[in-house]
DNA sequence: AGCAAGTGGGAATGCGCTTTCCAACTAATC
DNA sequence: GATTAGTTGGAAAGCGCATTCCCACTTGCT
């Protein structure tokens, strides 16, 4: 009933398990052609499938890459996951997926599970949280990961580093210039938009959101604009919807047309939806920009002004970077860059 | 350097490995409280993390669920994956992800990898292909999976069964009533739409697409409409775009406004985009319906008429179903149902 | 007091594979 | 033809853990 083993194959072929192992699963030494053929035939006739668990145990390398995301159904993460998948395939590994609720506690749990599975590398795609209430969990996460790295594990993190995790062998973070890009976006927007700005951000303390807000405000400041109001809400479509509902009420009686910066594209979509419900439209009643340039939203109208990020490439690079064992000082192969893309949603009314 | 082992913990605690194992990793027998505490402390101070590989080898259960999708970045699959993930977590398992190019050959490869890893269950989410050129690969896939099941593996498939795979222990397919739902959609559409119909489908031989086409045509026939033209293209946004481009040319000189049925929502979006480029709009110049009711597309305008499918629930159920070891005859807990949702994209011009 | 039943811990075996280390051979060199 | 180097297959020792026995012991009963 159970799958056949190497030993059975060896016996059928009339050789030792050692030999069978050598021919079946790549080894430096290659047995004679005749023997090899016999073994292969035996394996074939028995339907032998090597037990990766046993192999992993014997040679202490599992061929697994652990990926931690907030929500695999979110297009931001699924694009990233696609890149991780591509890199994994290229490196002949498989990816283990864990979705968390977005809290460091959940990430810690996932990291522990990956550590137990002895994943060759773990990739963390979700944003860090700097909220006070998460600091304990952040500490635990850092401790877990530090132990993981100390035991020879490799770790790749997208964006900001893990809070409280010192530089460690095998730990690499892939910087994403959220702040600079948001700054650039603000600069371009400030050049054409006269009215006031409003920022709709994720929860305070969500690193990615904070970076974007900070960058946007810096860009505004550099353009001589006064700092703007920031609305904090969920970093999701529904968060955007809520903020949009709130804004809609105010848009009605204000004479000036504001420019809204949403922390990411899906929030922007939520805002559009909310405004629409109130009979308001973009860009007529408000200009609107997002962030990420999610592929699935390109056909959305009005076309969203946003910042393009090579999501899949980010996933690829962070994975490859984590796996590569070059010295930590060496800079990443190529830096991640993004592009400000002004489209219809921020055109003059 | 390497992670510490159970043996080390046992030695530190001054007990045998057997005892340490019993206290650390749930066993029927629980050692005395004093001993247990000592072991736990030793484990803690050593930063012990059980090696899941070794555990898997020893008790021959890996706690892994293999998931095969065409493209994790596609919202259809990522929604499904989310459901699989939820079920996996509920059953205290982890999910191994494999994306294929959508061919049976790729799926076979992924299945083999999962079999090697001794995944407790494998879930296949992608549509089957009945194309002649895939029949050899389909055979191999069936053979691989049959062996996998024979060795005690469990298999869950979304929609249609694996071609050439006989009923086997541990093999369950979760039916998705694509055909009936498409039929229902056609019926409702035929009731209000006077003009001709056009179907934009995926490649001939892609089972899911074929089912939907068949159902739609049946619905049309039952409503007394003559069978309609079917355009075959890629089962993706770009496929829809291509078809839309093609249709745009013809819409110009035809007097009647057709109703287009796209095999899935993302194709429908592609069609809208293509028509738009030609100055045509939905529903004014053509009615349009999709399938799946992808969440990310709900804010799209015109709101898409479509068939809602509980994607996440499907992922959940197929996973749970595969894992459950009730007799194969027993019907699934609850059947998957969908809902026809007529919205703006098919309203009268 | 004497026995059975029960309990808590350890020794040993095995899960399926890789990988030294060895022994036996073959081929090459002087 | 003897010595050395080079090859090739096998024996055996793990990899880290679960688990089956087995033994020593405590408890409850007659």
Image: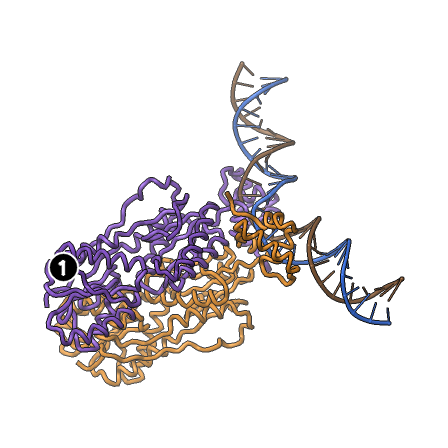
Chain colours: A purple, B orange, C brown, D blue
**Residue B230, can we see it?**
no
* Quarter-of-image position of residue B162: bottom left
Which subunit holds the residue at mark 1?
A
Q: Quadrant of the C terminus of chain B?
A: bottom left
Q: Is residue A10 left or right of residue B106?
A: right
Q: Is residue B278 left or right of residue B148?
A: left
Q: Nearer the viewer, residue A325 or A295?
A: A325
Eyeballing the image, is B39 above or below A261?
Answer: above
Residue B31, percent from left and from top: 65, 59
Eyeballing the image, is B48 above or below A303?
Answer: above
Eyeballing the image, is B255 above or below B56?
Answer: below
Q: Nearer the viewer, residue A117 or B336?
A: A117
Q: Is residue A193 left or right of residue A236?
A: left
**Within 10 angstroms of label 1, few (less than 14), some, or many (20 or more) residues?**
some
Residue A61, percent from left and from top: 48, 47
Q: Is residue A71 left or right of residue A30?
A: left
**Residue B315, can we see it?**
yes
For the point 44% across and 68% down, the residue is B161
Which SS class for mark 1? loop
Q: Nearer the viewer, residue A171 or B39?
A: B39
Residue B167, percent from left and from top: 51, 69
* Quarter-of-image position of residue B109: bottom left
Image label count: 1
Question: Mark 1 sits on what residue?
Answer: A225
For the point 50% across and 59% down, the residue is B119
Residue B86, percent from left and from top: 43, 67
């Amino acid at each position: 009933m159970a799958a056949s083993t190497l030993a059975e194959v060896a016996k059928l072929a009339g050789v030792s398990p050692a030999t069978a192992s050598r021919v079946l699963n790549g080894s430096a030494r290659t047995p004679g052609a005749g023997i090899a053929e016999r073994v292969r035939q035996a394996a074939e006739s028995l339907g032998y499938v090597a037990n990766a668990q046993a192999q992993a145990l014997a040679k202490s390398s599992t061929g697994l890459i652990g990926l931690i995301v907030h929500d695999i159904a979110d297009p931001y993460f699924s694009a990233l996951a696609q890149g991780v998948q591509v890199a994994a395939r290229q490196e002949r590994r498989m990816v283990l997926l864990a979705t968390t609720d977005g809290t460091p506690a959940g990430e810690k749990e996932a990291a522990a599970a990956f550590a137990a599975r002895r994943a060759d590398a773990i990739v963390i795609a979700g944003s860090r949280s700097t909220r006070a209430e998460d600091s304990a969990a952040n500490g635990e996460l850092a401790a877990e990961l530090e132990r993981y790295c100390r035991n020879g594990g490799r770790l790749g993190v997208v964006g900001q580093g893990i809070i409280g995790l010192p530089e460690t062998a095998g730990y690499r973070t892939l910087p994403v210039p959220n702040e600079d890009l948001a700054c650039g976006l603000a600069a371009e927007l400030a050049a054409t938009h006269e009215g006031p700005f409003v920022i709709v951000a994720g929860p305070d303390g969500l690193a990615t959101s904070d970076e974007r807000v900070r960058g946007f405000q810096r860009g505004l400041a550099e353009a001589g604009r006064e700092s703007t109001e920031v609305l904090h809400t969920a970093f999701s479509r529904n968060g955007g919807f809520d903020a949009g509902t709130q804004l809609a009420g105010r848009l009605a009686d204000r004479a000036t047309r504001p420019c809204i910066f949403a922390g990411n594209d899906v929030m922007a979509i939520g805002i559009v939806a909310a405004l629409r419900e109130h009979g308001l439209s973009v860009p007529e009643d408000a200009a609107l920009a997002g962030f990420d340039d999610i592929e699935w939203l390109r056909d959305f109208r009005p076309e969203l002004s946003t910042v393009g990020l090579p999501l899949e490439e980010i996933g690829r690079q962070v994975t490859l970077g984590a796996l590569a064992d070059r010295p930590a000082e060496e800079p990443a192969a190529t830096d991640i860059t993004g592009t400000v893309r002004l489209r219809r949603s921020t055109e003059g009314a």
